[in-house]
Amino acid sequence: MLKQYEVYGYRIAVYLLGDEASAAEASKDALAELYRTDAFFRQPSALQERTAKQVFMRHSLSAKASSRRRPS
C-alpha cells in the first residue's frame, strides 16, 4: 500500500530539498513513519494521501532545517 506514495513523496522531498540524496533519506524516514502508524492504513484513500503529504513535507522540512544547522 505504501508503494503508491513512494514516488509522490519523493517528488515532494526533491522539490523542498533540491537534493536527491537528502530527498531519498527524508522519503525513507517518512515511509517508515507511515508504516508504523496503524491508523494510516484504516483511513480512506483521500485522507491517506493528505496524511502522506504532510508526513513527507514534515520529514523534508526537518531535513532542510538540520542541514542549515550543520556548520559548512
Image (cartoon, rainbow, N blue to C red):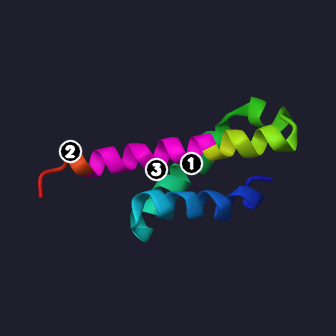
Q: Position of residue 2 (x, y in %)?
A: 74, 53
Residue assigned mark 2: 69
Q: Residue 56: tell me if it is visible.
A: yes
Left or right of residue 16: residue 64: left
Q: Amino acid at mark 1?
A: Phe
Which residue appears at 74% of the width and 60% of the height? 3
* Amino acid on which disc 2 is placed: Arg
The answer for how far apart the CA atoms under marks 3 and 2 are is 14 Å
Q: Is residue 39 above or below residue 13?
A: above
The residue carrying mark 1 is 56
Name the residue nearer the viewer: 52 or 3.
52
Q: Quadrant of the C terminus?
A: bottom left
Instruction: Identify the residue position indicated by label 3 in the image.
Output: 60
- Vertical side of 3 occupied by 47: above or below: above
Mark 3: which amino acid?
Ser
Q: CA distance from mark 3 to mark 1?
A: 6 Å
Residue 6, by quadrant, is bottom right
Q: Which residues are magenta?
A: 54-67
Q: CA distance from mark 1 to mark 2?
A: 20 Å
Residue sitting at x 75%, y 46%: 49
* Most common secondary structure along the magenta stretch: helix
Measured from the top left, where is residue 70 in percent x and y?
18, 49
Few, some or many C-alpha atoms within 10 Å of disc 3 (few <14, some 14-19, many ≥20)?
Answer: many
Q: Residue furthest front?
A: 15
Image side of residue 59 versus residue 65, left or right? right
Mark 1 is surrounded, within 10 Å at the Cα level, by few (under 14), some (14 to 19) or many (20 or more) other residues, namely many
